[in-house]
Image (cartoon, rainbow, N blue to C red):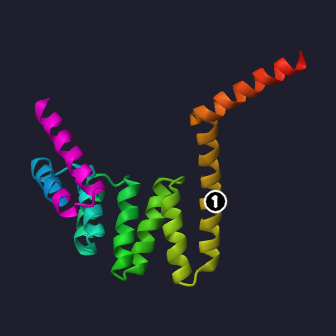
Amino acid sequence: MTANIDLQNRFNEAMAAFVGNRFDESISILGEIIKLDPTHKLALTARGSAHLKRKDPRSAVSDFTRAIEIDSSYARAYHLRGLARESLGEDESALADFDSAVRIDPVYGAAYYSRAALCTKLGREDQAAEDMETVAHLTSANIAVFANENNVWQSEHLRVEDAMESELQR
């Protein structure tokens, strides 16, 4: 139990370093975690992301590939590996990764967006337009969900308006 707590604390430290743009520190801490738990897919994915931020896409591809080997249904790892492969000029491999990401998670808007950008670059305008339409739809749906379920201000505002209307109608 305490080992899991220690790993989680170290992971949190690594993420704090990542958010603070201290990518070397993040990579180092994540490496320690991976040595202790070679199947820690989040640590592998985070370290791959830090490598991407450091402009080291080959190391990133390696980490994302390991995460995919651990969990072949991890859409985020496919998407991020696609971004790394695209930065290496491996456009067809990147496209295959983006395809895998959207097949696994059909509401993963970022993967559709990345695929649309790559398809535009490759001259595949029909696929790019279709993906951008999906991105727009997913964005609208996400905004509606946020506004309806999570926007406390809006809920309170509507309640105040209802109360004011009731008072005015008296």
What residue sits 30% from the left and 62% below the top?
49
Q: Nearer the viewer, residue 41 or 152?
A: 152
What residue sits 37% from the left and 83% below the top?
89
Q: Nearer the viewer, residue 161 or 58?
A: 161
Q: Quadrant of residue 55?
A: bottom left
Residue flagged by tag 1: what amino acid is it? Answer: Ala
| Image vertical order of residue 38 relative to residue 21, above or below | above
| Image vertical order of residue 140 relative to residue 99, above or below | above
Q: Nearer the viewer, residue 15 or 56?
A: 15
- Please name the predominant secondary structure of the magenta segment in the image: helix
Q: Nearer the viewer, residue 19 or 149?
A: 19
> Please, what secondary structure does the residue beneath circle 1 have?
helix
Residue 65, percent from left and from top: 27, 64
Q: Quadrant of the C terminus?
A: top right
Part of the protein shown in magenta: 1-26
Other-residue count near label 1 (Cα within 10 Å), few / some / many at <14 / 14–19 / ≥20: some
Horizontally, residue 165 falls left or right of residue 42, namely right
What residue sits 39% from the left and 70% below the top?
83
Q: Quadrant of the N terminus?
A: top left
Residue 39, percent from left and from top: 20, 50
Residue topped by disc 1: 136
Horizontally, residue 42 falls left or right of residue 35, namely right
What residue sits 79% from the left and 23% below the top?
164
Horizontally, residue 89 falls left or right of residue 18, namely right
